[in-house]
Image (cartoon, rainbow, N blue to C red):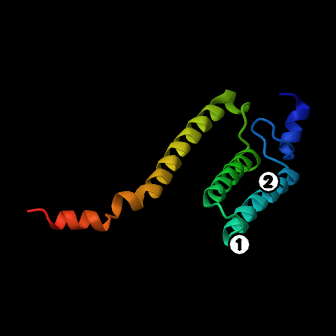
Amino acid sequence: MSASSNTSLEHGEGHGEGGHGSFRTYMIGFGLSVVLTIIPFWLVMNDVLDDRLLTVAIVFILGAGQMIVHIYFFLHMNSRAEEGWLAMSLSFTVLLVVIVLSGSIWVMFHLDENMMPSHDQIERVKALP
């Protein structure tokens, strides 16, 4: 690393290896985080879209965008940091989050069908010897 890059990292400029972001990059990250929070809140609280599935999809997409903003602007993770190990561990984490979220959504959407018996099923159980 050259002397000029060392001094820029010491002053908190840029997203260099091991460096922290500048005030400007933190404010950009903060602004994006606020926008990515307000939009889903507005969609849900004002019942803007008639299609509930579309609303859920938009909220999930904006949530994923917010995760990316936090990872890049606040955690300073990129593919160059620590020879790519951070990117690989991040990829594994994203895979686990997708598996957990999709499984949770699947369970929640099927709870009504699987947990609440219909009236006919209750009557069949009562008729058992």
Nearer the camera: disc 2 or disc 1: 1
Please identify the quarter of the rendering in which residue 17 is found.
Answer: top right
Residue 3 place in picture, x, y as percent: 89, 31
Residue 21 in the image: above or below residue 6: below
First along the sequence among labels 2 and 1: 2
* Residue contact at pointers 2 and 1, CB within 8 angstroms: no
Q: Residue at x 52, y 47 (%)?
A: 102
Where does the image place residue 14, in percent across and percent down from the top left?
A: 85, 42
Gap between marks 2 and 1 measured at Cα = 26 Å
Check disc 2 and give the amino acid type.
Gly
Q: Position of residue 115 (x, y in %)?
A: 34, 61
Q: Is residue 40 left or right of residue 2?
A: left
Q: Can you give x and y, in whole percent of width and height, for residue 2 in the image? A: 87, 28
Q: What kind of residue is marked 1?
A: Asn
Q: Helix or strand or loop: what does disc 2 sit on?
A: helix
- The N terminus lies in quadrant: top right
The 10 Å Cα crowd at callout 2, few under 14, some 14 to 19, many 20 or more, is: many
The relative height of residue 87 versus residue 109 in the rendered view (above or below) is: above
In the image, taking residue 80 as reference, residue 91 lies left or right, namely: left
Outermost bottom residue: 46
Q: Residue drawn 24% across and 66% down?
A: 122
* Res. 29 mark: 2
Residue 46, label in figure? 1
Name the residue located 86 percent from the left edge and 54 percent from the top edge: 23
